[in-house]
Image (spheres, rainbow, N blue to C red):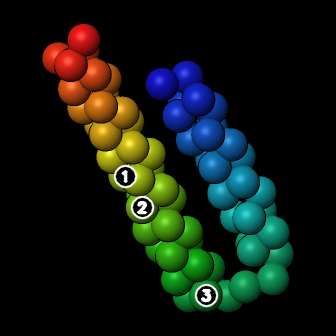
Amino acid sequence: MDGTLNMLRQVKKLLDFIFTLTRITLTAEEEAKLRDFITEAALLCKNTVLEFAEMRNTLRDYEEMQA
């Protein structure tokens, strides 16, 4: 789970950096659209990581039952 948290922290840092860049060049409407897109992408990433963690736990449970 530490790897998951580390990855999410890195995604947040990247998003913060992107927001900083876009504030310089985009209109408020463009920035809002980009922010929404990035937020959706981050949520998809988070959900994927959580699904993989759940699959990993399921596999561990299965392996324990087979032992």
- Which residue corresponds to mark 2? 44
Q: Nearer the viewer, residue 67 or 62?
A: 67
Q: Helix or strand or loop: what does disc 2 sit on? A: helix
Task: Judge depth for marks 1 and 3 and give the one in front.
Answer: 1
Q: Position of residue 56 (x, y in %)?
A: 36, 33
Q: Are marks 2 and 1 in contact (CB under 8 Å)?
A: yes
The type of residue carrying mark 1 is: Asn
- Which residue corresponds to mark 1? 47
Measure the C-alpha gap from mark 1 to mark 3.
26 Å
Q: Which residue appears farthest toward the left when viewing the image?
A: 65
* Relative side of 25 to 42, left or right: right
Q: Position of residue 16 (x, y in %)?
A: 70, 54
- Residue shown at the point (33%, 46%) measured from the top left: 51
The type of residue carrying mark 3 is: Glu
- Residue shown at the point (48%, 73%) measured from the top left: 36
- Which residue corresponds to mark 3? 30
Residue 45 versus residue 38 in the image, above or below: above
